[in-house]
Image: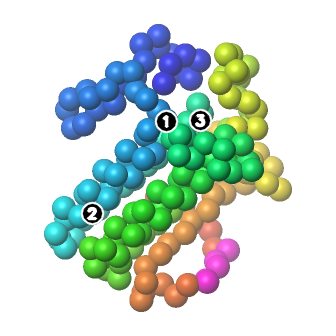
Amino acid sequence: MIRPWVGTDRPLELWRDTLPIEHPVDQSTLTRRYTEEAVRFIRESDGEPFFLYLAHSMAHVPLHRSPEFEGRSKGGLYGDVVEELDWSVGRVLEALREAGLEKNTLVIFTSDNGPWMYMPDRMFEGDAIKPWDAGTAGPLRGAKAGTYEGGVRVRFIAYWPGRIPGGQVSSELAILMDL
């Protein structure tokens, strides 16, 4: 991350534990690398209980996807990013199945907020992103940093074979703090 997305001229570093491992960061590799780390963590759990929090950098701007996903979607760059995130979730679920942990693991997929629809003009310097790269709240009013539904209403998918029957939909209100 560099200006205009962060308030520093020094590109941020990628860290492992207490050591920086990459500077500047090749953001096109982050989704794949985060996924590989999650799969490694699951494999090394050896059946012991664990908590894995996988917070992808994408689909936050500036958007990046690996070369393998470039042009895979009819939705442009943002669509390519979503395709790679979908691949990542599939890979994590596959790792759980391979480790025999699928039925003992609650998997939650959600987001922290809606799209960033009102980005300041500085975000579009250098032509790295376009206004539509922020995604959409669909028919909902509002966006990130607001209290209208478009800013706070996000998908919440809970997957736990044998415990949560598939195909259920709920319109109950909840907040992530409930977790």
Q: Position of residue 144 (x, y in %)?
A: 66, 42
Q: Position of residue 35 (x, y in %)?
A: 39, 52
- Residues packed near mark 2 inside 10 Å, few (<14), some (14 to 19) or many (20 plus): many
Circle nearer the N terminus (3, 2): 2
> What's the CA distance linking mark 1 and mark 2?
23 Å
Circle nearer the N terminus (1, 2): 1
Dot 2 amino acid type = Ile
Q: Residue 28 carries which label?
A: 1
Q: Position of residue 149 (x, y in %)?
A: 73, 54
Asked which secondary structure carries label 1, the reply is helix
Task: State the extent of the magenta-drawn residues as a range.
Answer: 167-171
- Residues packed near mark 3 inside 10 Å, few (<14), some (14 to 19) or many (20 plus): some
- Majority secondary structure in the magenta region: loop
Q: Which sits in the foreground, 101 or 98?
A: 98
Q: Mark 3 sits on what residue?
A: 63
Pointer 3 with pointer 2, Cβ within 8 A: no
Dot 3 amino acid type = Leu
Q: Residue 42 carries which label?
A: 2
Asked which secondary structure carries label 3, the reply is loop
Q: What residue appears at the point 59 percent right and 35 percent down from the top-left corner?
A: 63
Q: Position of residue 167 (x, y in %)?
A: 61, 83
The quarter of the image holding the C terminus is bottom left
Q: What residue appears at the point 73 percent right and 48 percent down from the top-left corner?
A: 75
Which circle, 3 or 1, is nearer the viewer?
1
- Could you say which quadrant of the image residue 130 lies in? top right
Dot 1 amino acid type = Ser
